[in-house]
Amino acid sequence: MTLYPQLIIEALEKVRYPGTGKNLVEAGMVADNIRIEGNKVSFSLITEKPNDPFIKSVVKAAETAILTYISPEVEIQGNISVKTKQDARPEPEKLLPGVKNIIAVASGKGGVGKSTVAANLAVSLAGMGFKTGLLDADIFGPSQPKMFHVEDAAPYLEKVGNRELIQPAENYGVKLLSIGFFVNKADAVLWRGSMAGNALKQLIGDANWGELDYFLIDLPPGTSDIHLTLVQTLAITGVLVVSTPQEVALADARKGISMFTGEKVNVPVLGLIENMAWFTPAELPENKYYIFGKEGGKRLAEELNIPLLGQIPLVQRICESGDTGAPVALDPDTVTGSAFRKLAENVVERVDYRRKHLSPTKRVETHK
């Protein structure tokens, strides 16, 4: 028997809450914390009031629905906890209590260098003295292990307090976890969105990230339920959107920004990063060739009234460094290393500005 969160959701859609007549999912009573360990399933139901007169019968009905519509072998009895909405809302903030800033790195489409930017930004932040972590959430194409030269790392469990937590790999001062550590790197990852989301939650909540100034999340390209899962799981400080100057890439970047600023997600966009802004040959370091178009990212940033935080040139060494696992940001005195250091400085400045001058962003609650 293979269990995954969507099966649980579908079973709970069969259960109606007597107070409203809506099913549990429709009524927003199912918390986004479904955990599956073998045949054991656990999650929380959320009620409006601490003394809900219907909640005991609803919990029993939920257990019966899962055993009836999925399998009588599911271990569910006694594994459904109850929380009030007041108790449930702060949960994302508590998931990584030692992390000061959580920043997602996103792109509207693949192939724009999002993972390269995320890796070099993490290295630059670490080089500036910040405690930095990086989660490779690009679950269908994990590339960070190679970029950090830790492909053969085998993260292990270690007891921390009364819990066993995954110990992230570490290189260049950056703590790193990736689904790439746990799958055969020669095989494609064929997972439904709910399975991928559940795996990512474990890499976040069941890992020993410790105290961090910046926790970067390298998101999959495009827009998907994985993005929704992460913003519902974590209190994200803001998102960085990576694009090339090409109009096709900018159109997709615009859609990505729209998703993050939309009502259902509502995460601040810290700024836009224009990658492959121009081509500079090694033998002519002062020359700039705008092979993907000129300043498309700058125009989009101005149109959407968001900061352009950096323009990264297209240089052969960036590609080579990614393949060899030695990010160019390790040498901030080079043209490319300097570009990533300036980007990191701008990100820090932007985060500090938002904290000082803007009110906290309303966090999304669980959506169906």
Image: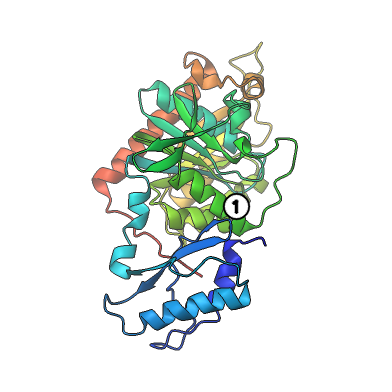
**Image-quadrant location for residue 355:** top left
Side of 305 where 69 appears, left or right: right
Give the left or right position of residue 290, taking residue 213 as reference. Answer: right
Kind of residue at badge 1: Ala
Judging depth in this view, the residue of 265 and 242 nearest the camera is 265
The residue located at (37%, 80%) in the rendering is 56
In the image, residue 178 sits, relative to residue 267, either above or below, namely above
Q: Residue at x 59, y 59 (%)?
A: 194
Q: How many marks?
A: 1
Q: Residue at x 60, y 41 (%)?
A: 179
Q: Position of residue 341 (x, y in %)?
A: 44, 24
| Quadrant in which the N terminus appears | bottom right
Q: Judge whether 21 appears above or below 313 on screen.
A: below
Instruction: Give whichever of 185, 217 is nearer the camera.
Output: 185
Q: Residue 269's spot in the image, x, y percent?
A: 44, 49
Instruction: Specify how the rendered protein is coloured.
Output: rainbow
Per the image, label 1 sits on a secondary structure element best described as helix
The answer to whether residue 294 shows anywhere in this view is no
Residue 52 vs residue 58: left or right?
A: left
In the image shown, does 144 or 281 lie closer to the viewer? 144
Residue 18 in which image quadrant: bottom left
Query: x and y percent of residue 165 in the render?
Result: 44, 40
Judged from this view, the residue extending furthest toward the left is 356
Please give the residue where the numbered disc 1 appears in the rendered image.
196
Q: Residue at x 66, y 41 (%)?
A: 141
Q: Where residue 44 appears, x then y in whole percent?
A: 41, 66
Is residue 213 visible from the viewing direction of this image? yes
Q: Is residue 41 shown above or below 97?
A: below
Residue positioned most to the top:
283
Q: Is residue 76 above or below residue 212?
A: below
